[in-house]
Image (spheres, rainbow, N blue to C red):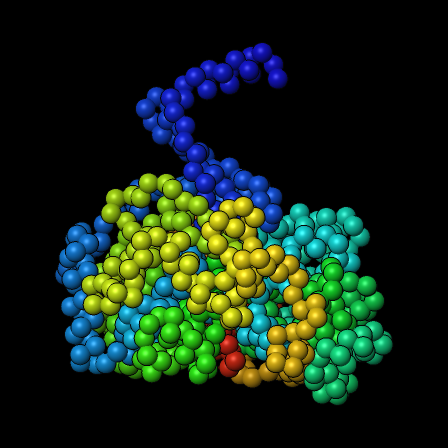
Amino acid sequence: MSELLLKYFRDQQKKIQSERVYDTQCPYCSMQCKMQLIEQTVVSRKQYKTVGKDNPTSQGRLCIKGLNAHQHALHRSRLKQPLKKVDGDFVPITWPEALELIAKNVNEIQAIEGKDALSVYGSASITNEEAYLLGKFARVGLGTKYIDYNGRLCMGAAATGANQTFGMDRGFTNTIEEIPHTRCIILAGTNIAECQPTIMPYFERAKENGAYIIAIDPRETKTTKIADLHLKNKPGTDVAIANSLLKVIIDHGLTDEQFLTSRTNGFEQVKQHLLAIDLNQTSEQTGVPVDQLIQAATIFGKEESGMIFTARGIEQQLDGTAAVRSFLNILLATGKIGVPNSGYGAVTGQGNGQGAREHGQKADQLPGYRSIENTEHRAYIANVWGIPENELPRKGVSAYEMFEKIDQGDITGMFIMCSNPVVSNPNANFVKKALEKLKFLVVADMFLSDTAKLADLVLPATSYLEDEGTMTNVEGRVMLREATFPVQGEAKHDWQIICEIAKAIGRGKYFSYQSAEEIFEELRIASKGGIADYHGITYDRLRHEQGVLWPCPTPEHPSTKRLFEYSFAHPDGKAKMVFFANESSPPKPRPDSDYPLILTTGRVMSHYLTGEQTRKSHSLAAQNVEAFMEIHPDTATRYNLKEQALVKIESAYGEIIVRSKWSTTIRKDTVFVPFHWTDSQNVNKLVSNQLDPFCRMPGFKVSAVKVSPVN
Ligand SMILES: Nc1nc2c(c(=O)[nH]1)N[C@H]1C(S)=C(S)[C@@H](COP(=O)(O)OP(=O)(O)OC[C@H]3O[C@@H](n4cnc5c(=O)[nH]c(N)nc54)[C@H](O)[C@@H]3O)O[C@H]1N2
Ligand SMILES: Nc1nc2c(c(=O)[nH]1)N[C@H]1C(S)=C(S)[C@@H](COP(=O)(O)OP(=O)(O)OC[C@H]3O[C@@H](n4cnc5c(=O)[nH]c(N)nc54)[C@H](O)[C@@H]3O)O[C@H]1N2
Ligand code: SF4
Ligand SMILES: [Mo]
């Protein structure tokens, strides 16, 4: 370093009057990168920067979102007081006033309409402690069966697929450190390069080690660029792709007969159906040449190890469960699971997308991945919670279906924590109207989101900088997010908000926690003996061991690095294979003369989900200031759409206006719009109300639309 530069740094250092360092984890994706916020006071002004911190999963890396996360958390529009709507405007009120308002409305609605008239909508961006508590709050606090959460729109199909095939659902069956050593990787509908960027070095190392990478995606993305082979399929044809791959594997004698006999059920039935498949027809249907299907299948079948990763591209479909299970059939038929360097990864989405789907926020679930319809499970949890078993409600309905229940008049009150459903749910115009019908809507958020704007009462919540708790990352590794940044204004942690509401409605004795750790101690007991068993995990262990992979039944248990080495989680120990027809029901929206193009939706690197947070960060917002529609130039020309011009997109459900972005890398029959923007740019106004019959996942990835220029 030159003398001049050294002097510059010394002078800069001298200006810093004080420095504080706060540990935390990134508030965004499932990598849960460990980070530190550095606060320096310079000439009496505070300045902030975020730096990465070493840990076994992200190894100190951060992506652009993590590096700038503090910009939204420290944004001036953070909510600092409860807000009550009076004549259409929000006025600040005190916490006691807010809690009194809740008690009054809860009592009134319950007295007139019964307990199931109230509902809870949760999130996979809150901690395990909060997710657990929200499930308990719905059942024990409010006594309602209606609770579900945003993870339904996210991990629903992957979870149901893995539960049905394996008997349990932990996103990655292996630790991330095995990825560089596998020989062949299928990336089905996942854009890890933009959505979990800090995972990329594991895949890059696999490639350096000679792994063959196959990507399946209707678009070329930063992820497909690392692939040796890109199957650029028509959106929504992934069941057909998976079936054809397995057919080729069988035809070429590449199945693992011993594994199939000793470890699985159902293969013969699958095989019989696959024999009837004509590859030329599949090629026609999917838009993928036959030779590419054969190449992908034979390489995967022949290599000694292999991994399949799926994400929302194949899962957010009306046959998402079928797609997941069809890809799992390939792993099972080739014996590439339960052994080193082979396995499955459902690439989890939200920060706590794994943990929040295990401990009771789902409509049919109790903590530890227990079932609310199972008598033994009910008895166990009722005992932990100190209530009679018959007071535990039964199962409710999925996220989107709760809005239908509002529309039908069955639900009249809702508490939404950490989600923005008017932007993220399908058929968004309908969802907004439903929320407007509610007698009482309470939203806990950090900002006045589009959903919060519809509320009668908005409660200010703390952020990832302030709120301590555990998050379970993409690997299934439970991590302790230390957080000590001072709370802003009168904001409260989500768990505190739940406890205070419970107290206000007379259920305080079940919710008298003083810390997140105290809730975790109860969660340990509630999950004990369940599939997602956290009993052996303590805050102390998490601090010393840098996270623990579940199941971890006892304090002595080392953590579970690889699943299914000896048996699957079904009672007979075997995995269940099943065949789904290429065209699974219900039918997907199909392009026709009225709506000739396929619309698919997803993400860009710099924004996160409904954009409520990332749009507040100037560094991130500057990367993409508005929504766009990716379209092939030939298609654009056919519909008179200029580059960078405004386009109207219409479906049978609604219309939006966004800017066109020409790209030769997308299929000519397909357009793509990200979902990070609201109002007239909210792409979910176009998505249908249909749901996957098994997991109730909406079909975010296939809509039929027409496009026209806005003059
Ligand atoms: N930058 C960023 N990162 C994120 C998020 C974010 O909003 N922004 N969100 C987080 C969350 S919650 C989630 S769930 C994950 C999502 O992570 P991903 O699932 O990887 O993200 P998506 O962009 O929704 O979809 C992935 C890919 O599927 C492709 N695709 C679309 N339709 C089809 C289809 O029919 N078949 C196939 N095979 N592929 C298709 C899209 O072109 C896209 O490239 O990302 C997490 N990380
Ligand atoms: N078209 C289309 N739609 C989709 C998808 C798609 O691919 N295409 N993907 C779906 C997927 S995978 C997902 S995960 C969903 C996500 O859908 P949402 O959950 O609706 O999305 P977010 O933007 O994460 O909303 C979180 C809200 O909580 C607030 N918040 C953040 N942190 C906290 C906190 O700690 N406490 C509280 N109380 N509030 C907080 C934020 O300000 C924000 O308003 O969207 C789904 N919708
Ligand atoms: S967005 Fe994901 S990859 Fe990026 S820093 Fe945050 S946790 Fe890590
Ligand atoms: Mo997600």
- 577 versus 701 height, above or below: below
Residue at the spot 32% in from the left edge and 79% down from the top edge: 388
- 621 versus 557 height, above or below: above
Residue at the spot 52% in from the left edge and 80% down from the top edge: 694
Horizontal relation, residue 385 to residue 301: left or right: left
Q: Nearer the viewer, residue 619 or 669?
A: 619
- Whether residue 661 is visible: no
Tell me where residue 578 sits by quadrant: bottom right
Residue 91 on image: x %, y %: 17, 53
Q: Nearer the viewer, residue 144 or 76?
A: 144
Tell me where residue 405 sits by quadrant: bottom left
- 62 versus 475 height, above or below: above
Residue 516 on image: x %, y %: 38, 54
Residue 95 on image: x %, y %: 19, 54
Q: Nearer the viewer, residue 551 or 702?
A: 551
Q: Quadrant of the N terminus?
A: top right
Q: Which residue is outermost to the top?
A: 3
